[in-house]
Amino acid sequence: MKQSVQRRWALLLALILITGVCFLFAGRKQGMFIDEIYTFGLSNSSYSPFLGGLKYGSIEHRVFTRAELLDYVSVMGDEGFDVGSVYYNQVHDVHPPLYYWLFNFASTLAKGSFSMWIGLVLDYVIYLGCALMLYALVRRLGGSRLNGAAAAVLYGLSLIGLSTMLMIRMYVLLTLLTVVLAYFVADLMLDFKKRTCLFVGLTLLAGLLTQYYFVFYAFFLCAAYVVWALVKKQYRALAWFVPCALIGALSLLLVFPAALDHLFSGELVSGESALDNLKNLAQYPARFKVFFGAARHGLKAAIFTALAALAALLVCRVRGRKAEIRGEWLVLILPAFVTLVLVAVISPVDEPRYIYNIMPLFVLAVSFLLDLLERACEGVKYRERAAAAVFLAIAALALWEARSAPPDYLYPEHAGYNAVLKEHSASPCVFFAEPEWAFVPMTEDLMQLLIFPEVYVTDQKSLQPMLDYVGDADEAVVFIDISKFWSSGYDDAALIRRIKAETDYTKAEQLFTIGLSTTYLISK
């Protein structure tokens, strides 16, 4: 046991640092954006994917109680482990169901509760698995234990990696499965076995059942392996690999045939929108700036390490020391760069989460450089001590990156929003939105709406329904759906002027704005 710990001290240190930083930031997370709340609803609402679904009937002029809102986002009664409900909800959404099945399982273990910690703990477990798989991948490619531990800590403490873990969505599982697929392809190149082809097929199916954007890196990686095998004249390997990969990918249509409907739906997240984005050449520069900038900002320690390794390799070359390049590394790394360019162009919105899953492969590129450096320095005096010192320097650099700027998806401002609302939680709460769109901003504001015993939903056609609901209350909290792109697009200033002119509520204070809606306190 003692010898095992001594051999793996660097990996243990990396995992301890990753765990500590993950929970440090998880404790600072104060809110969620709309897609994260959809994760809870789509996973845990029994056969009703949205607040406006069949379970709730018409949303027009309707009172939602706190219990009903909680029922949407948590597992209640005998609803636990409901695979069929999750499947049904995802058919009516735009994503496949694998992550949502796992989330429903985790929520069932915390039955009756709605807490960010359900998603954060699940994501942490998956994230730690990703760091371990990245370590295993470096080791499988012939890298040292210190190199593998450096890869784990460079990714695990990166801002973009931590953002992946803190966002309660399927991207953390997508990242893990991307690294798993790379591991199996590496295994095939180094020691071909028929069963590994079966594992590739299963991983392809699991990845596509997690998020459709898995297809891009998977496609380019499989294509790179085919080229590698052809160059090596490993025709027997291809005879097994190609059918297994195709069967694994096409099995998606058997397991989840709704994928075809999602692909051709014409919605924002669909194959049609991706094709439209591909044709729109004018947007390319702006999109490249967003996605390349996110990768550069989110992998600072990895980039600095890569630059230092390149400089050291140059010195080694000048001194006549060099190492042979192993092509297996490049087969795994180069498809990530191609994927970055393509996804930057076709993603439904210019947000970096669509490239989160390939970030470990860029860290693998750093490990490739470190491997070259280690092999170029073979026979150098105090080489092992120097390698340990380099690892510690990399770990310190990664900690500096984690400390230099917070990751995304913390939403610290929500603490202030909630504190303000709690001061008025006994007052009536009214949500102005068009009936067919109200569930969208209500989902985004759900954590704030849960502060109230109930919320009344109405539109702006007439103010009388609102007056009938609030009665003789001296004040009321009013949410107004203002998004022209996603939902109702009300003019909140105009609506507030109407309320002041047509009712006894002559005072209005704007409290805050969260994405799709803005919130006011109206009083007499």
Image: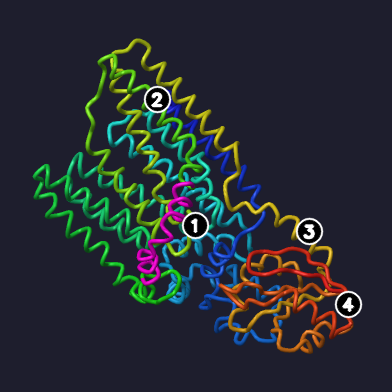
Magenta region, mostly helix, strand or loop? Answer: helix
Identify which amino acid the numbered label 2 is placed on.
Answer: Arg
The alpha-carbon separation of the residues under discs 3 and 4 comes to 24 Å
Crowd rating for badge 1 (residues with CA inside 10 Å; few <14, some 14–19, many 20+): few
Crowd rating for badge 3 (residues with CA inside 10 Å; few <14, some 14–19, many 20+): few
Specify the quadrant that holds the C terminus: bottom right
Which one is closest to the eye, mark 4 or mark 2? 4
Q: Is residue 222 above or below residue 259?
A: above
Identify which amino acid the numbered label 1 is placed on.
Answer: Glu
Q: Residue at x 67, y 70 (%)?
A: 517
Report if the CB atoms under discs 3 and 4 are less than 8 Å apart: no
Extreme-front residue of the structure: 282
Q: Is 165 left, or right, of 416 in this rendering?
A: left
Q: Tell me the SS state at disc 4.
A: loop
Task: Determine if residue 210 is in view.
Answer: no
Q: Tell me the SS state at disc 3.
A: helix
Image location of residue 232, percent across then percent down: 11, 42
Specify the quadrant that holds the N terminus: top left
Q: Is residue 486 above or below residue 181?
A: below
The alpha-carbon separation of the residues under discs 4 and 2 comes to 72 Å
Q: Please name the residue that numbered disc 4 is placed on.
A: 506
Which one is closest to the eye, mark 1 or mark 3? 1
Q: Please name the residue that numbered disc 3 is placed on.
A: 419
Q: Please name the residue that numbered disc 1 is placed on.
A: 351
